[in-house]
Amino acid sequence: MEIVPDLSKIREAHHRILSQIHVTPVLTCESLNELAGADLFFKCENMQKVGAFKFRGASNAVITLSRKDAASGVVTHSSGNHAAALALAAKRRGINAHIVMPRNAPAVKIAAVKNYGGMITFCEPTLEARENTADAIIADTGAVFIHPYNDYRIIAGQGTAALEFLDVVEDLDYLLAPVGGGGLLSGTAISAKSIQSSIQVIGCEPQNADDAYHSYKTGKIVPSVNPDTIADGLKTSLGDKTFAIIRKYVDDIVLVQEQEIVTAMQLIYERMKIVVEPSSSVVLAAALCGRLNISGKKVGLILSGGNVDMSHFFSSLLD
Protein backbone atom coordinates (compact mmCIF):
# COMPACT_ATOMS: atom_id res chain seq x y z
CA MET A 1 0.00 0.00 0.00
CA GLU A 2 1.34 3.42 -0.97
CA ILE A 3 1.72 5.90 1.87
CA VAL A 4 1.36 9.66 1.51
CA PRO A 5 4.77 11.23 2.17
CA ASP A 6 5.25 13.18 5.38
CA LEU A 7 8.07 15.51 6.37
CA SER A 8 10.33 12.62 7.32
CA LYS A 9 9.88 11.08 3.85
CA ILE A 10 10.67 14.40 2.21
CA ARG A 11 13.80 14.75 4.35
CA GLU A 12 14.81 11.23 3.31
CA ALA A 13 14.23 12.16 -0.33
CA HIS A 14 16.39 15.26 0.07
CA HIS A 15 19.24 13.26 1.57
CA ARG A 16 18.84 10.73 -1.25
CA ILE A 17 18.99 13.23 -4.12
CA LEU A 18 21.33 15.82 -2.63
CA SER A 19 24.35 14.63 -4.62
CA GLN A 20 22.32 14.80 -7.86
CA ILE A 21 20.59 18.19 -7.65
CA HIS A 22 21.51 21.83 -7.28
CA VAL A 23 20.62 23.45 -3.98
CA THR A 24 19.14 26.45 -5.74
CA PRO A 25 19.61 30.01 -4.47
CA VAL A 26 17.05 32.28 -2.84
CA LEU A 27 17.09 35.78 -4.34
CA THR A 28 15.48 39.07 -3.38
CA CYS A 29 14.73 42.27 -5.30
CA GLU A 30 14.09 45.62 -3.63
CA SER A 31 12.17 47.10 -6.55
CA LEU A 32 9.78 44.13 -6.63
CA ASN A 33 9.35 44.42 -2.87
CA GLU A 34 8.24 48.01 -3.41
CA LEU A 35 5.75 47.01 -6.09
CA ALA A 36 4.29 44.25 -3.90
CA GLY A 37 4.40 46.20 -0.63
CA ALA A 38 5.92 43.07 0.91
CA ASP A 39 9.23 41.29 1.39
CA LEU A 40 9.55 38.79 -1.45
CA PHE A 41 11.92 35.83 -1.47
CA PHE A 42 12.39 33.84 -4.68
CA LYS A 43 13.45 30.17 -4.64
CA CYS A 44 15.12 29.83 -8.05
CA GLU A 45 14.28 26.39 -9.42
CA ASN A 46 14.83 27.90 -12.85
CA MET A 47 18.49 27.32 -11.94
CA GLN A 48 17.91 23.64 -11.17
CA LYS A 49 19.38 20.94 -13.42
CA VAL A 50 17.30 20.57 -16.61
CA GLY A 51 16.09 24.08 -15.78
CA ALA A 52 13.18 23.09 -13.55
CA PHE A 53 12.12 21.65 -10.19
CA LYS A 54 11.08 18.46 -12.02
CA PHE A 55 14.57 17.02 -11.64
CA ARG A 56 14.02 16.67 -7.89
CA GLY A 57 11.06 14.34 -8.21
CA ALA A 58 12.45 12.42 -11.17
CA SER A 59 15.72 11.80 -9.31
CA ASN A 60 13.91 10.54 -6.22
CA ALA A 61 11.70 8.22 -8.26
CA VAL A 62 14.59 6.73 -10.24
CA ILE A 63 16.97 6.33 -7.29
CA THR A 64 14.34 4.48 -5.23
CA LEU A 65 13.72 1.84 -7.91
CA SER A 66 14.85 -1.63 -7.00
CA ARG A 67 17.66 -3.11 -9.08
CA LYS A 68 15.18 -5.50 -10.66
CA ASP A 69 12.79 -2.73 -11.69
CA ALA A 70 15.57 -0.39 -12.79
CA ALA A 71 17.01 -3.03 -15.10
CA SER A 72 13.99 -2.66 -17.40
CA GLY A 73 14.24 1.11 -17.52
CA VAL A 74 11.57 3.74 -17.03
CA VAL A 75 8.85 5.23 -19.21
CA THR A 76 6.71 8.34 -19.11
CA HIS A 77 4.63 10.53 -21.40
CA SER A 78 5.46 14.21 -21.32
CA SER A 79 6.11 17.08 -23.67
CA GLY A 80 7.65 19.26 -21.00
CA ASN A 81 10.19 19.46 -18.22
CA HIS A 82 9.38 16.05 -16.72
CA ALA A 83 10.51 14.37 -19.93
CA ALA A 84 13.97 15.93 -19.75
CA ALA A 85 14.18 15.42 -16.00
CA LEU A 86 13.41 11.70 -16.19
CA ALA A 87 15.82 11.25 -19.10
CA LEU A 88 18.67 12.80 -17.11
CA ALA A 89 17.81 10.94 -13.89
CA ALA A 90 17.79 7.65 -15.80
CA LYS A 91 21.07 8.50 -17.51
CA ARG A 92 22.62 9.16 -14.10
CA ARG A 93 21.60 5.67 -12.98
CA GLY A 94 22.65 4.06 -16.26
CA ILE A 95 19.21 2.82 -17.30
CA ASN A 96 16.97 3.42 -20.30
CA ALA A 97 14.38 6.18 -20.33
CA HIS A 98 11.53 5.76 -22.81
CA ILE A 99 9.84 9.11 -23.36
CA VAL A 100 6.53 9.33 -25.19
CA MET A 101 6.11 12.78 -26.73
CA PRO A 102 3.38 14.21 -28.96
CA ARG A 103 4.42 14.92 -32.52
CA ASN A 104 3.82 18.63 -32.00
CA ALA A 105 6.07 18.92 -28.95
CA PRO A 106 8.32 22.01 -29.01
CA ALA A 107 11.60 21.40 -30.80
CA VAL A 108 13.56 22.75 -27.82
CA LYS A 109 11.93 20.13 -25.55
CA ILE A 110 12.66 17.30 -27.99
CA ALA A 111 16.28 18.41 -28.25
CA ALA A 112 16.62 18.47 -24.45
CA VAL A 113 15.31 14.92 -24.06
CA LYS A 114 17.65 13.65 -26.79
CA ASN A 115 20.56 15.48 -25.20
CA TYR A 116 19.95 13.66 -21.92
CA GLY A 117 19.79 10.29 -23.64
CA GLY A 118 16.03 9.77 -23.64
CA MET A 119 14.61 7.31 -26.18
CA ILE A 120 11.71 9.21 -27.76
CA THR A 121 8.60 7.62 -29.23
CA PHE A 122 6.31 10.12 -30.93
CA CYS A 123 2.53 9.86 -30.85
CA GLU A 124 -0.54 11.87 -31.74
CA PRO A 125 -1.17 14.87 -29.46
CA THR A 126 -3.95 13.33 -27.36
CA LEU A 127 -3.91 11.91 -23.85
CA GLU A 128 -5.31 8.61 -25.14
CA ALA A 129 -2.49 8.27 -27.67
CA ARG A 130 0.15 9.13 -25.05
CA GLU A 131 -1.20 6.57 -22.58
CA ASN A 132 -1.64 3.85 -25.20
CA THR A 133 1.89 4.37 -26.53
CA ALA A 134 3.35 4.22 -23.02
CA ASP A 135 1.36 1.05 -22.28
CA ALA A 136 2.74 -0.56 -25.45
CA ILE A 137 6.30 0.26 -24.39
CA ILE A 138 5.67 -1.17 -20.92
CA ALA A 139 4.29 -4.38 -22.45
CA ASP A 140 7.30 -4.66 -24.75
CA THR A 141 10.10 -3.73 -22.34
CA GLY A 142 8.78 -4.10 -18.80
CA ALA A 143 9.80 -0.49 -18.11
CA VAL A 144 8.44 1.14 -14.96
CA PHE A 145 5.99 3.99 -15.52
CA ILE A 146 6.86 7.23 -13.72
CA HIS A 147 3.93 9.64 -13.72
CA PRO A 148 4.87 13.33 -14.09
CA TYR A 149 3.14 14.32 -10.85
CA ASN A 150 0.59 11.79 -9.52
CA ASP A 151 3.23 9.65 -7.80
CA TYR A 152 4.26 9.84 -4.13
CA ARG A 153 7.95 9.45 -5.04
CA ILE A 154 7.63 12.46 -7.33
CA ILE A 155 5.70 14.47 -4.73
CA ALA A 156 8.30 13.77 -2.04
CA GLY A 157 11.08 14.88 -4.37
CA GLN A 158 9.31 18.09 -5.31
CA GLY A 159 8.76 18.85 -1.62
CA THR A 160 12.51 19.17 -1.11
CA ALA A 161 12.50 22.64 -2.73
CA ALA A 162 10.35 24.04 0.09
CA LEU A 163 12.48 22.14 2.61
CA GLU A 164 15.55 24.03 1.42
CA PHE A 165 13.62 27.28 1.17
CA LEU A 166 12.43 27.27 4.78
CA ASP A 167 15.88 26.33 5.99
CA VAL A 168 17.19 29.58 4.48
CA VAL A 169 14.26 31.93 5.12
CA GLU A 170 12.44 31.48 8.42
CA ASP A 171 9.01 32.73 9.45
CA LEU A 172 7.49 33.21 6.02
CA ASP A 173 3.88 34.38 6.18
CA TYR A 174 3.03 33.06 2.71
CA LEU A 175 4.51 30.49 0.35
CA LEU A 176 3.35 30.67 -3.28
CA ALA A 177 3.81 27.87 -5.83
CA PRO A 178 2.41 27.28 -9.31
CA VAL A 179 -0.16 24.53 -9.77
CA GLY A 180 -0.73 22.41 -12.85
CA GLY A 181 -0.82 18.70 -12.07
CA GLY A 182 -0.09 19.54 -8.45
CA GLY A 183 3.19 17.72 -7.79
CA LEU A 184 5.10 20.83 -6.75
CA LEU A 185 2.23 22.40 -4.80
CA SER A 186 1.38 19.22 -2.89
CA GLY A 187 5.00 18.51 -1.97
CA THR A 188 5.51 22.15 -1.03
CA ALA A 189 2.42 22.13 1.18
CA ILE A 190 3.48 19.02 3.09
CA SER A 191 6.92 20.46 3.79
CA ALA A 192 5.76 23.96 4.65
CA LYS A 193 2.84 23.04 6.91
CA SER A 194 4.91 20.41 8.72
CA ILE A 195 7.74 22.85 9.42
CA GLN A 196 5.63 25.93 10.14
CA SER A 197 1.91 25.34 10.68
CA SER A 198 1.09 29.06 10.55
CA ILE A 199 2.36 29.57 7.00
CA GLN A 200 -0.23 30.24 4.29
CA VAL A 201 0.39 27.96 1.30
CA ILE A 202 -1.13 29.38 -1.89
CA GLY A 203 -1.44 27.73 -5.28
CA CYS A 204 -1.15 30.06 -8.28
CA GLU A 205 -2.92 29.22 -11.52
CA PRO A 206 -3.78 30.90 -14.84
CA GLN A 207 -7.42 31.97 -15.12
CA ASN A 208 -7.41 30.38 -18.58
CA ALA A 209 -6.50 27.00 -17.08
CA ASP A 210 -8.45 27.11 -13.84
CA ASP A 211 -9.26 23.46 -13.23
CA ALA A 212 -7.29 23.26 -9.95
CA TYR A 213 -9.13 26.34 -8.65
CA HIS A 214 -12.54 24.81 -9.40
CA SER A 215 -11.45 21.42 -8.07
CA TYR A 216 -10.31 23.04 -4.83
CA LYS A 217 -13.51 25.07 -4.45
CA THR A 218 -15.93 22.23 -5.29
CA GLY A 219 -14.13 19.43 -3.48
CA LYS A 220 -13.95 17.16 -6.54
CA ILE A 221 -11.54 16.96 -9.45
CA VAL A 222 -12.67 19.15 -12.33
CA PRO A 223 -10.72 18.14 -15.46
CA SER A 224 -8.89 20.70 -17.53
CA VAL A 225 -10.81 21.32 -20.77
CA ASN A 226 -9.12 23.17 -23.63
CA PRO A 227 -6.83 25.34 -21.47
CA ASP A 228 -5.51 28.34 -23.39
CA THR A 229 -2.64 29.92 -21.53
CA ILE A 230 0.89 31.09 -22.16
CA ALA A 231 1.85 29.07 -19.05
CA ASP A 232 2.00 25.78 -20.95
CA GLY A 233 3.41 23.86 -17.98
CA LEU A 234 0.19 24.44 -16.03
CA LYS A 235 -2.34 23.00 -18.48
CA THR A 236 -2.56 19.55 -16.87
CA SER A 237 -5.33 18.39 -14.54
CA LEU A 238 -4.77 17.41 -10.91
CA GLY A 239 -4.28 13.75 -10.06
CA ASP A 240 -6.11 11.96 -7.26
CA LYS A 241 -2.98 11.85 -5.09
CA THR A 242 -2.04 15.50 -5.55
CA PHE A 243 -5.64 16.66 -5.14
CA ALA A 244 -6.07 14.90 -1.80
CA ILE A 245 -2.89 16.53 -0.43
CA ILE A 246 -3.83 19.96 -1.77
CA ARG A 247 -7.28 19.77 -0.19
CA LYS A 248 -5.71 18.91 3.16
CA TYR A 249 -2.80 21.34 3.30
CA VAL A 250 -3.26 24.23 0.86
CA ASP A 251 -4.95 27.40 2.09
CA ASP A 252 -6.16 28.80 -1.22
CA ILE A 253 -5.65 28.91 -4.99
CA VAL A 254 -5.39 32.30 -6.68
CA LEU A 255 -6.13 32.88 -10.35
CA VAL A 256 -4.13 35.28 -12.51
CA GLN A 257 -4.80 36.69 -15.95
CA GLU A 258 -2.64 36.24 -19.04
CA GLN A 259 -1.48 39.86 -19.11
CA GLU A 260 -0.55 39.63 -15.43
CA ILE A 261 1.60 36.59 -16.19
CA VAL A 262 3.36 38.36 -19.06
CA THR A 263 3.93 41.49 -16.98
CA ALA A 264 5.34 39.45 -14.09
CA MET A 265 7.65 37.58 -16.45
CA GLN A 266 8.92 40.85 -17.90
CA LEU A 267 9.51 42.26 -14.42
CA ILE A 268 11.57 39.22 -13.42
CA TYR A 269 13.68 39.53 -16.56
CA GLU A 270 14.18 43.28 -16.18
CA ARG A 271 14.52 43.62 -12.42
CA MET A 272 16.13 40.31 -11.39
CA LYS A 273 18.08 39.59 -14.59
CA ILE A 274 17.13 35.91 -14.62
CA VAL A 275 15.30 33.74 -17.16
CA VAL A 276 11.98 32.20 -16.14
CA GLU A 277 9.22 30.52 -18.11
CA PRO A 278 5.60 31.74 -17.97
CA SER A 279 4.60 28.94 -15.59
CA SER A 280 7.10 30.35 -13.07
CA SER A 281 5.79 33.87 -13.44
CA VAL A 282 2.31 33.08 -12.08
CA VAL A 283 3.64 33.35 -8.53
CA LEU A 284 4.81 36.92 -8.95
CA ALA A 285 1.61 37.71 -10.84
CA ALA A 286 -0.35 36.45 -7.82
CA ALA A 287 1.77 38.53 -5.44
CA LEU A 288 1.17 41.70 -7.46
CA CYS A 289 -2.47 41.27 -8.50
CA GLY A 290 -4.01 42.52 -5.26
CA ARG A 291 -6.00 39.34 -4.59
CA LEU A 292 -3.82 38.36 -1.66
CA ASN A 293 -3.46 40.41 1.51
CA ILE A 294 0.33 40.32 1.64
CA SER A 295 1.02 43.94 2.57
CA GLY A 296 3.97 44.09 4.97
CA LYS A 297 4.34 40.29 4.96
CA LYS A 298 7.23 37.92 4.22
CA VAL A 299 6.33 36.04 1.06
CA GLY A 300 8.12 33.09 -0.48
CA LEU A 301 7.74 32.41 -4.20
CA ILE A 302 8.93 29.27 -5.96
CA LEU A 303 10.14 30.02 -9.50
CA SER A 304 9.47 26.60 -10.95
CA GLY A 305 11.51 26.67 -14.16
CA GLY A 306 13.35 28.65 -16.80
CA ASN A 307 13.01 26.68 -20.02
CA VAL A 308 12.14 29.20 -22.70
CA ASP A 309 12.80 28.81 -26.43
CA MET A 310 15.03 31.82 -27.01
CA SER A 311 15.69 31.13 -30.69
CA HIS A 312 13.14 33.68 -31.90
CA PHE A 313 14.60 36.33 -29.62
CA PHE A 314 18.17 35.81 -30.77
CA SER A 315 17.24 35.54 -34.44
CA SER A 316 15.37 38.83 -34.15
CA LEU A 317 18.62 40.55 -33.13
CA LEU A 318 19.87 40.03 -36.68
CA ASP A 319 16.74 41.30 -38.42
Image (tube, rainbow, N blue to C red):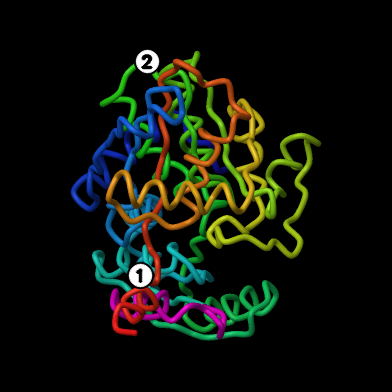
Residue stretch rendered in magenta on the structure: 101-117
Residue in the image at 30% along x and 34% along y: 29
Q: Mark 2 or mark 1: which is in front?
A: 2
Front-lying residue, 94 or 238 = 238
Is residue 156 positioned above or below 251 on the image? below
Q: Which residue is at the front of the view, 63 or 154?
A: 154
Q: Where is residue 187 in the image (x, y as percent from the top left)?
A: 48, 38
Task: Residue at 55% x, 37% y: name it.
Answer: 286
Which amino acid, by three-letter code, is at mark 1? Ala
Q: Which residue is drawn at 48% across and 56% down?
A: 278
Q: Does the magenta stretch include residue 115?
A: yes
Q: Residue 214 carries which label?
A: none
Percent x, y of residue 203: 57, 37
Question: Is 113 rendered above or below residue 288?
Answer: below
Q: Mark 1 points at which residue?
A: 87
Numbered disc 1: secondary structure: helix
Q: Say few, some or many: other residues with alpha carbon within 10 Å of mark 2 (under 14 / 14 to 19 / 20 or more).
A: some
Tell me which numbered mark, 2 or 1, is placed earlier along the sequence. Answer: 1
Name the quadrant of the C terminus: bottom left
**Which residue type does callout 2 highlight?**
Asp
Tell whether position 80 is magenta: no
Q: In which quarter of the image is the N terminus?
A: top right
Where residue 170 sits in the image (x, y, percent)? 32, 18
In the rendered image, is residue 65 in sight?
no
